[in-house]
Image (cartoon, helix red, strand yellow):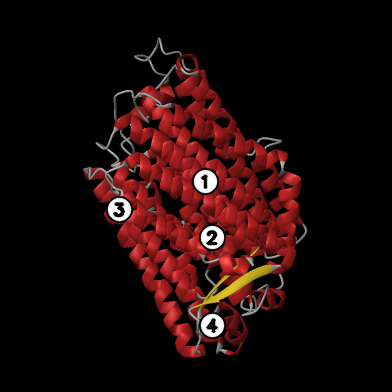
């Protein structure tokens, strides 16, 4: 039964978009439609997740054609989990955005444009997670790209337009690599179905496999912000409105990570590039966190930590063992939740303090203890402090790594530990300067603050303080509670991740489950 309802996960947001546009002059009705659609997707996603856990996978072929000719949607444990997590994050960010829109009006972020575009973005996300063929995944990516450009340029300010241009150009380059790889695979194998590609790719000449494999990794690496393809992210995300930045940071890069998982575990399981992936993982970890240390703007700082922590996931994928993949699945869920939450908190800091620069902020611990608490919990989590989910995910990755010892693996373990320690430095610096530093001494900042103030990378920009609505408080508090729940529910989540990883690590089992009739 659930297989027949699987298309609704993509169709509902598109139908909601049409309804939202029809009632565009009634923003509160739009909000009801958007929230109802996303809550409906959560319900369908949880049902799909339970069915996939019981059966291994569920799938359906659309259009009255048999697979692989018809469009096939499939949900295994991993994709079903990501649909649920993405939908929950979309609800949390939407509530925040609704509160911000009702408080500020349409001057900076036109809410009547935001809501239908937000649903289009959601449809693209869900389509990418559920696609069982590469071309349908490409379509999902392009839906996200179109919606992302509108969202990142909302308000039409100069910085946002410049960021939008950077984002769209880099994304189009990524799309060229992706589409070229799809064309090459179709020309060489006669199919774009992931199931059939998994069976036919091993028969291709080695040079063709390498070419297509690298083209897909470049395309997905740009989406995932893997070094050296991550240069665009810190300049694109921080200029967007806080809700947009939060959903981009939490979800869009993880679509790229998800696509890399599919590439490495299903399509090219027998054509390994694990060593280059490990090297890239180590460089992503280090370059990202060193960039974060150099920042004075909170949102740019968080953008660099986002890049850095992609390295943890890439390392787990490169290891490729069931234990490493299970740790990666858990870490993806952790990072989506914590990173989204921190960007929402950054939005609160900017509204309460009037700036996003740590050199212009001080005394917020006394001025707003609630914001201080909401920052501290996910910051400790992202830094990997026990017993939070960040610590559990990193520990699981380290344990999976030491089970496969080699000089490169041990080097990466050392880099992971170093990165985790370095992550605490910029997060603690935000706490010390923004919250702990007395507000009575703004004219005499510390030597570190004076040095940062002279840093041309991110010159501080003063903004007026703005009211924080009840919806914004409620959304951010709920998201922080979710980050804590990842620790409380770590046992069941790791159990689910273990079951998902056991299939991901066995390409033959994955092919059987995602086949035309798998789980239907």
Q: How busy is the neighbourhood of tag 1: few (under 14 within 10 Å), some, or many (20 plus)?
A: many
In this view of the protein, which residue sits in the foreground, 444 or 481? 481
- Residue 274, image x, y percentages: 62, 68
The numbered mark, 3 or 4, whose residue comes first in the sequence reads 3
In this view of the protein, which residue sits in the foreground, 333 or 55? 55
Q: Which residue has dot 4 on it?
A: 209
Q: Which residue has dot 3 on it?
A: 22
In this view of the protein, which residue sits in the foreground, 501 or 492? 492
Q: CA distance from mark 1 to mark 2?
A: 17 Å
Q: How busy is the neighbourhood of tag 2: few (under 14 within 10 Å), some, or many (20 plus)?
A: many
Q: Which residue has dot 1 on it?
A: 89
- Residue 179, image x, y percentages: 40, 75
Q: CA distance from mark 1 to mark 3?
A: 26 Å
Q: CA distance from mark 4 to mark 1?
A: 36 Å
| Residue at the spot 78% in from the left edge and 58% down from the top edge | 403
In this view of the protein, which residue sits in the foreground, 308 or 202? 202
1 vs 2, front mark: 1
Q: CA distance from mark 2 to mark 4?
A: 20 Å
What is the secondary structure assignment of the residue under circle 3?
helix
The numbered mark, 4 or 1, whose residue comes first in the sequence reads 1
């Amino acid at each position: 039964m659930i297989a027949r309802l699987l298309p609704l996960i993509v169709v509902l947001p598109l139908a909601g978009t049409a309804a939202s546009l029809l009632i565009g002059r009634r923003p509160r009705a739009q909000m009801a439609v958007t929230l109802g659609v996303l809550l409906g997707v959560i319900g369908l996603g949880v049902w799909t997740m339970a069915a996939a856990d019981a059966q291994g996978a569920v799938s359906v072929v659309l259009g009255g054609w048999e697979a692989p000719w018809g469009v096939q949607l499939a949900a295994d444990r991993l994709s079903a989990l990501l649909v649920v997590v993405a939908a929950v994050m979309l609800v949390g960010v939407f509530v925040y955005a609704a509160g911000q829109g009702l408080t500020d009006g349409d001057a900076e972020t036109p809410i009547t444009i935001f809501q239908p575009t937000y649903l289009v973005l959601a449809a693209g996300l869900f389509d990418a997670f559920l696609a069982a063929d590469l071309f349908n995944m490409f379509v999902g990516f392009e839906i996200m790209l179109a919606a992302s450009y509108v969202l990142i340029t909302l308000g039409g300010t100069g910085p946002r337009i410049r960021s939008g241009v950077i984002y769209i150009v880099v994304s189009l380059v990524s799309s060229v690599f992706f589409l070229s790889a799809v064309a090459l695979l179709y020309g060489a194998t006669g199919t774009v179905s992931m199931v059939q590609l998994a069976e036919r790719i091993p028969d291709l000449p080695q040079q063709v496999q390498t070419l297509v494999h690298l083209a897909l990794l470049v395309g997905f690496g740009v989406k995932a912000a893997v070094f050296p393809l991550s240069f665009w992210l810190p300049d694109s995300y921080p200029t967007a409105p806080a809700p947009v930045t939060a959903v981009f940071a939490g979800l869009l890069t993880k679509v790229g990570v998800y696509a890399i998982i599919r590439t490495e575990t299903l399509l090219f399981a027998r054509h390994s590039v694990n060593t280059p992936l490990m090297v890239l993982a180590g460089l992503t970890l280090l370059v990202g966190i060193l960039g974060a240390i150099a920042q004075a703007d909170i949102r740019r700082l968080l953008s660099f930590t986002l890049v850095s922590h992609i390295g943890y996931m890439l390392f787990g994928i490169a290891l490729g063992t069931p234990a490493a993949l299970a740790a990666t699945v858990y870490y993806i869920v952790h990072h989506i939740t914590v990173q989204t939450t921190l960007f929402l908190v950054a939005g609160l800091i900017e509204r309460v303090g009037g700036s996003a620069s740590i050199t212009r902020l001080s005394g917020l611990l006394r001025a707003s203890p609630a914001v201080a608490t909401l920052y501290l919990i996910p910051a400790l989590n992202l830094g990997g402090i026990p017993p939070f989910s960040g610590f559990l995910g990193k520990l699981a990755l380290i344990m999976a790594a030491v089970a496969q010892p080699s000089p490169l693996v041990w080097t990466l373990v050392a880099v992971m530990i170093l990165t985790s320690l370095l992550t605490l430095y910029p997060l603690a610096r935000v706490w010390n300067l923004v919250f702990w530093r007395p507000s009575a001494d703004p004219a005499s900042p510390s030597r570190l603050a004076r040095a940062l103030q002279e840093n041309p990378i991110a010159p501080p920009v003063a903004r007026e303080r703005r009211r924080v609505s009840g919806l914004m408080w409620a959304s951010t508090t709920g998201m922080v509670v979710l980050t804590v729940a990842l620790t409380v529910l770590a046992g069941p989540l790791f159990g689910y991740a273990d079951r998902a990883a056991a299939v991901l690590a066995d390409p033959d089992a994955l092919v059987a489950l995602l086949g035309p009739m798998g789980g239907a």
